[in-house]
Amino acid sequence: MTPRHLLIAMLVPITWGFGFALAKDGLSHFPPLLLMGMRFGIAALVLVWFVPLPRGHWRSLTLIAVISATLQYGLVFSGLAMIDATPAILLVQSEVVFGTIIAAIMLKELPTMRQLAGTCIALVGIVTIVGAPSLTGQMTGVALILTGCLCWALGQVMVRRLGDVMSGFQMTAWIGTIAAPQMLLASVLIEGNPLPALRLRRPSPGPLFSILGW
């Protein structure tokens, strides 16, 4: 791995961590599904004009959007609303563990010994975090996050299969376009009338707009 590739790899978790910190503030304004629905809607409005229609792949994209976007983000951010951002960020790394296992089962991509050792270490870390005293009485939030991570891992295996016929940028744009109305509908059905939440209660909405744009 070149230094450039290493830097890019490091930027991914840094970006995720910063995004979760912003999301925690956003959740003080909006319920999780509504916040994610607006976030995906903004992303879709920006990206969808620059990609071709996914002809012949609507069914696959819809299924991926349900599993790896609507379910995953809905569950993870519902859990984030219940626990602190720091343990939530650490728990989200369980995606790697789930992804390794599912890829081995569905894609027959067996991990190397080094990858297997890293996965086992990550699993021990997850168990340690779940058993931490700071999460006592917050197992519902933990369970939501871990279930969401499992959905993400399954969705990424499906994305991997579709990657041979569609670019990552195109998939991202259309998954967001499909997921946004799903999340907004789920928000209305589960979280209720969104209009009261749309009235900002705090005078400084800067962090909120940051998470929506992130």
Image (spheres, helix red, strand yellow):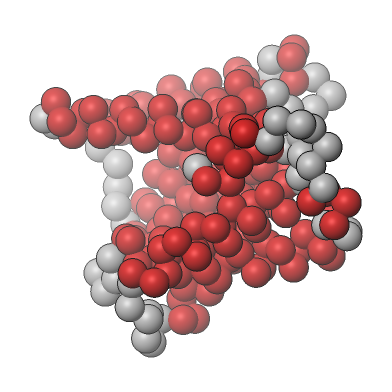
Asked whether residue 145 is in view, the answer is no
- The residue sitting at the front extreme is 203
| Residue 201 quadrant | top right
Asked whether residue 58 is in view, the answer is yes
What residue do we see at 33% from left, 61% from top?
169
Between 147 and 103, the residue placed more toward the observer is: 147
Between 82 and 136, the residue placed more toward the observer is: 82
Between 168 and 117, the residue placed more toward the observer is: 168
Residue 137 pos. (x, y %): 84, 24
From the viewer's perspective, is residue 200 above or below residue 57?
A: above
Residue 18 pos. (x, y %): 50, 28
- In the image, taking residue 75 as reference, residue 156 lies left or right, namely left
What residue do we see at 50% from left, 65% from top?
45
From the viewer's perspective, is residue 184 above or below residue 143?
A: below
| Residue 113 quadrant | top left
Residue 117 pos. (x, y %): 35, 26
What residue do we see at 52% from left, 21% from top?
125
Residue 192 pos. (x, y %): 88, 59
What residue do we see at 64% from left, 25% from top?
85
| Residue 209 quadrant | top right
Between 180 and 72, the residue placed more toward the observer is: 180
- The residue sitting at the top extreme is 133
From the viewer's perspective, is residue 24 above or below residue 53?
A: above
- In the image, taking residue 139 as reference, residue 150 lies left or right, namely left
- In the image, taking residue 93 as reference, residue 55 lies left or right, namely left
